[in-house]
Image (cartoon, rainbow, N blue to C red):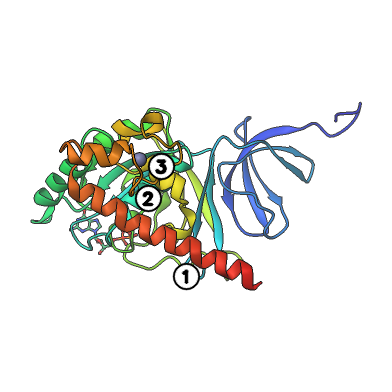
């Protein structure tokens, strides 16, 4: 509450997180560092009110989380609109990677899209054709070369439509190259593993929010390579799996249908009718097995504790 003479609240957005301090871009255009407690839960993209040295976080529209290799949970960014899943013909994404990323994005209320980098490689056109066949209409696909610059304009236009986004992809697909190409001011080192840089050292910037000259904003989070399986629950997978868009919602007999063996299942029905490719459904079942196994495992851990 503002009493007469109290420090006025200045609205802003967190554009960089340095562990013990965050950088705030105020609506006036000014930037300031504000000290925060370690693990205070703030993240780039957060809208805040700053009174003196005190930072108040405003409610989030969306929040995107990931797990690291050690199982630790991290916030990637707040108030994001879109998630770019970056893949390349080399190194190829592991089985199920794209689908898990799409499900995680949709579950967090972000619109997923695919960036197919390294379009200059010989294997690229077949790879792009396969992806277009697997994800027809439902997910936008941007084939491009971050290194050569080909195909970047459609992505710039898309991001420029006021989107705030982030990229996820395995190491080596060209995420740093892509960020460098889209916002040259960022100047990331290419070909180095970033997971290391993201933690430990005192002054390291954990993540940053960049405004693009074409419009739109990108969050750069070192080490954002995958979502742990644990972050996807069965209902999210069943609701958001790419390919199930036509048969979603209330069309299965059971509202919590896992689309495995349930009677009156619209997904099973559309496979039988040839409307949903059998290999798409097989991929779903494989990921469902993994998610169920990991849920069972964490239940076991819960009992033991
Ligand atoms: P990251 O690990 O996802 O950040 O990937 P990097 O940006 O570090 O790139 C990994 C490797 O891919 C580097 O050797 C880059 O030079 C290379 N690379 C990036 N973009 C392209 C591209 O468009 N075409 C080709 N052929 N190589 C690329
Ligand atoms: Zn079903």
Residue situated furthest bottom in the rendering: 304
The location of residue 162, given as percent across then percent down, is 43, 29
Of pointers 1 and 3, the one earlier in the residue sequence: 1
The location of residue 272, given as percent across then percent down, is 18, 40
Which quadrant of the structure image shows residue 155? top left
Residue situated furthest right in the rendering: 4
Ligand 1 picture quarter: bottom left
Mark 3 CB lies closer than 8 A to ligand 2: yes
- At 60% across and 64% down in the image, what residue appears? 203
Q: Which residue is mark 2?
A: 101
Label 3 element class: loop
In the picture, the disc for residue 196 is: 1
- At 17% across and 36% down in the image, what residue appears? 273
Q: Nearer the viewer, mark 1 or mark 2?
A: 2
Give the vertical position of 231 relative to 4 (above or below). Answer: below
Label 1 element class: loop
Pointers 1 and 2 in contact (CB under 8 A)? no
In the picture, which quadrant includes the C terminus?
Answer: bottom right
- At 23% across and 63% down in the image, what residue appears? 91
Which quadrant of the structure image shows residue 187? bottom left
Q: Nearer the viewer, mark 3 or mark 2?
A: 3
The location of residue 73, given as percent across then percent down, is 56, 59
């Amino acid at each position: 509450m503002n009493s007469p003479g109290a420090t006025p609240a200045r609205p802003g957005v967190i554009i960089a997180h340095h562990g013990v301090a965050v950088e705030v871009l105020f609506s006036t255009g000014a930037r300031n560092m504000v000290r925060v407690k370690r693990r205070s839960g703030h993240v780039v993209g957060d809208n805040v009110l700053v009174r003196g040295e005190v930072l108040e976080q405003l409610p989030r529209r969306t929040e995107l989380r990931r797990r690291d290799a050690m199982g630790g949970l991290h916030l990637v960014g707040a108030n994001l609109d879109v998630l770019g899943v970056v893949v390349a013909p080399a190194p190829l994404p592991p089985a199920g990677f794209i689908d898990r990323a799409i499900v995680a994005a949709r579950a967090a209320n972000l619109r997923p899209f695919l960036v197919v980098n390294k379009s200059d490689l010989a294997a690229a056109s077949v790879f792009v054709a396969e992806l277009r066949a697997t994800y027809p209409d439902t997910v936008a696909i941007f084939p491009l070369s971050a290194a050569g610059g080909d195909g970047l304009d459609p992505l710039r236009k898309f991001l420029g439509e006021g989107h705030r986004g982030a990229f996820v992809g395995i190491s080596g697909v060209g995420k740093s190259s892509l960020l460098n190409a889209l916002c040259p001011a960022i100047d990331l080192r290419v070909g180095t593993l970033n997971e290391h840089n993201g933690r430990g050292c005192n002054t390291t910037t954990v993540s940053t929010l960049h405004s693009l000259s074409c419009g739109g904003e990108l969050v750069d989070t070192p080490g954002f390579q995958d979502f742990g399986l644990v972050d996807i629950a069965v209902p999210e997978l069943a609701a958001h799996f790419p390919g199930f868009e036509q048969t979603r919602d209330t069309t299965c007999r059971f509202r919590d249908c896992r689309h495995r063996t349930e009677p009156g299942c619209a997904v099973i029905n559309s496979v039988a009718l040839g409307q949903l490719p059998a290999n798409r459904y097989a991929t779903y079942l494989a990921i469902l097995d993994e998610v169920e196994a990991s849920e069972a495992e964490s239940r076991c851990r819960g009992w033991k504790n």
